[in-house]
Image (spheres, grey):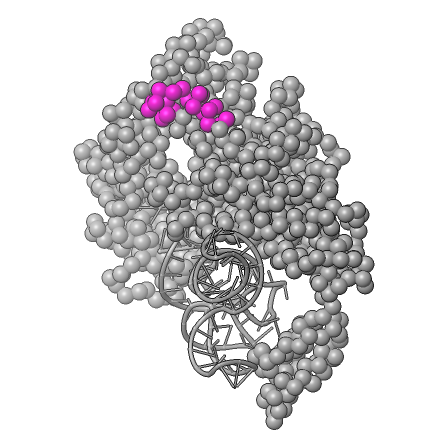
Amino acid sequence: MEERYDPKKVEPKWQTLWAEKNLYKTRFDETLKKFYCLEMFPYPSGKIHMGHVRNYAIGDVIARYRRMQGCNVLHPMGWDSFGMPAENAAIKHGVHPSKWTYENISYMKSQLNKLGLSYDWDREVTTCSPDYYRWNQWFFIKMLERDLAYRKSSYVNWCPSCETVLANEQVIDTKCWRCDSVVIQKELFQWFLRITRYADELLDACGRLTGWPEKVVLMQKNWIGKSFGVEVDFRVDGSGENIRIFTTRPDTLFGATFICLSPPHPLSQQLVQDKAGLEKITAQYGKADEKIGLFTGRYCVNPVNGEKIPIYVANFVLMEYGTGAIMSVPAHDQRDFDFAAKYGLPIRQVIAPESGQTQGSPLQEAYEEEGALVNSGDFTGTDSAAAREKIALYLENKGLGKKVVNYKLRDWGISRQRYWGTPIPVVYCDGCGIVAVPEKDLPVILPEDVKFTGKGGSPLLDSPSFLETACPACGGKARRETDTMDTFVDSSWYFVRYCFEKNDPGVGSKMRTMSPELRYWMPVDQYIGGVEHAVLHLLYSRFFTRVLRDLGLTECDEPFLNLLTQGMVIKDGSKMSKSKGNVVDPDYLIDRYGSDTSRLFSLFAAPPEKDLDWSDKGVEGAYRFLSRVWNVVFRNLDVLRAAVPAGRNPDVSALSEAGRGVLRKTHQTIKKVTSDIEKEYHFNTAIAALMELVNEVTGLENPAGEDRIALKAAVESTLLLLAPFTPHIAEELWEAIGNPPFIAARAWPGWDEELAREDEIELVVQVNGKLRGKLMVAFGLSDEELKKRALDDEKTAEWISGKSIRKVIVVKGRLVNIVVG
RNA sequence: GCCCGAGUGGCGGAAUUGGUAGACGCAAGGGACUUAAAAUCCCUCGCGGGAAACCGCGUGCCGGUUCGAGUCCGGCCUCGGGCACCA
């Protein structure tokens, strides 16, 4: 054994041995208790960053801990490898997205292995490989069959100069990120997945996501955004047309003083004569800064009171939500209030804060709360909650409206006018229209003969070999769909693919039916990743899992039983970023301190769910700790190697005071580390406990007799407890003290409650709640005895002399509080 | 604007969930070893007073409940995060 701890010698050695033995290979065995531990797979951008190190270190601790607990652990890794950066690299450097991506994967995989992460690489998933994305296509076809996939017209960001579609993040301050042209909204036919069909189920099931952070569940609920209201028809005066509006406040119906249409609403075009004016409003559609409107010149009739009210087109009314038209009640909605004030429209109060009382006029702002109805015909006097119900029923009975439920959640637009994604498997035939590619013809493979110019739309449009095909239905000439899928499709089910080995020859049938593997492994027991995916990725995955269930592939509704959202890695007060110049390069860190140190620090500096403040000095502290562990073993090598049966507890009566202290601390530490991991994955406090144990062991100099056994037990326990956190040094020292490899495959240690117990406790004495003394007393004294000890204490006496004791409170085995007056 | 979350030493963070505030680590100061430095080891380390024993104060602010509050309740302040014209 080397005298000094040198991770450069230790870490590659064990990485090689683990790989040679394929130590982390998972075997499907239904007789074992399974544990599926998953970290969000990375986009292969080139190199890993500290956020990955943290994420994967957390996951690796959990996976290794569960393995030592005897679980059959599935801990896979893969690559979310479709997406724009590869295509951008192609445009910029002329390298094919595929080459760029696979080179990145190869490098990043070596980085992950250098971190000592315990993945079963036989299950590696690469989403840009046809073996993977063929299933995207298969799912798409199945969804098409079930009317879960459909085409509709929708708007995209379009750069007129580059003639290309832009993602939202490529639109910077309304301009194209590359050429600075003003981006316009262009209408295209695109593919959508009908996630809204599952809106209610996804919402209801939120209540069962007990293993998720409440914050994330709440974000999901808000995103789905269910609300109850009514749709009401307002007849357009002097025409047979009706305007259907949606409101959640039918109780304010008598207060409607105008109607607003969304600019894209069909009636906007029909009713407005001033086309130039409409154009102007449309240009401002969806802009949050200012509310503007245009009077159509027409009126409609409020069905409950027959009143004629003007119809406006307003830029703030969304076409995508409700009916694209609203009734405006300026007295009770701040937006309508602002609009009415601007255009001089009447404001009529119909809800009074307290029965019968209206606020002074003119109103300063809208009153949006509950209250009692006024100026509301037969409904006057009713309170708003009841009125909502009564007016809704009244409308339904008269055939003027109906109760409806609305969601903020929209169907998921998956079309991307890009090359580097899964081709959407349909063709367009002049005779047959839209035809799905038959299953037997999957996968539809991305062609290689393409050029990347960054202009003129998708490169697939210039690939005749791809574009021109035969219609599967009639055999005639047909054109392929050139849109590819949103990469969120890829990541919505990758956890399912991990349940089979990469090269499993049977995967073709297993993916189509309920396979034992899927039934065994799903759902993911612990999912770990950044909170930035709190809504989209997690919601899409929940949706996909339900579709898979309905296709008969799985039995589970929810993909992720427990979710851990780790915090960001911060340095100098802000998130690490190239532009801030505060990035720490994992390669440098591993080279300088080793991966055990890198892992240890990122686990020690903060609990996983909180942001982690990076500190170069803190990393050195972590390294120092591992060196201390190394030194303890080195100094005591002879004692540790001596033939002492492993796992035998020392004879307590034969131990020195220090030896007893070490033994006690050992058992206390096993207990503490186990519960810190088990309870909240609070690795920081678990590591702190290990540091305390090592400090205690360091104090046991030149152990003799039975103390040597206490020392060995302490060191072995330390290494076992350390193994999930810093696997390399744990393996090395485990071997150094004479154990066969691998510590990673050993059982997690247990503790003995008796040995962990303190002989004496420190009794805290308070007088009137203030700390006045501490005394050491034997463990296990009765409350009465504790009380007596406290009252008998000299120091206590000083504080109570001359006063009468009113009450004495004893907290079992901890504290006595004497109340005097 | 609405909805969450968090405020504890010079810093990162602990605190058995109502019972010793500041574990562990970092930084800082002092000492040992060394010709010297690095490394390592030992000691001190919330603030104020005191030579010391000890005393007072202290978990963003104000109030409350309680024998006892970092922890519970009410009201404010500040900082993060999410949603943002969803009618």
Whether residue A804 is situated above or below residue A200 in the rendered picture: below
Where does residue A421 sit, x and y in percent of width and height? Answer: 44, 24
- In the image, is A196 to the left or to the right of A545? left
Q: Residue furthest top?
A: A476
Q: Which is more toward the observer, A672 or A21?
A: A21
Where does residue A814 sit, x and y in percent of width and height? Answer: 67, 72
Quadrant containing the C terminus of chain A in the rendered view: bottom right
Q: Which is more toward the observer, A17 or A531?
A: A17
Quadrant containing the N terminus of chain A in the rendered view: top right
The image quarter in which residue A761 lies: bottom right
- The answer, for residue A584, to whether it is visible in the render is yes
The image quarter in which residue A739 lies: top right
Residue at 74% over, 71% down: A779
User: What predominant SS class does the magenta segment belong to?
Assistant: helix
Residue at 50% over, 50% down: A620
Whether residue A201 is situated above or below residue A763 in the rendered picture: above
| Residue A96 falls inside the magenta stretch | yes
Residue at 28% over, 65% down: A360
* Number of disc labels: 0
Whether residue A651 is situated above or below residue A597 in the rendered picture: below
Q: Residue furthest bottom?
A: A802
- The answer, for residue A535, to whether it is visible in the render is no
- In the image, is A371 to the left or to the right of A641? left
Residue at 64% over, 57% down: A698
- In the image, is A136 to the left or to the right of A71? left
Where does residue A387 sit, x and y in percent of width and height? Answer: 43, 55
- Boundaries of the magenta span: A87-106
The image quarter in which residue A477 lies: top left
| Residue A806 falls inside the magenta stretch | no
Where does residue A338 sit, x and y in percent of width and height? Answer: 26, 52
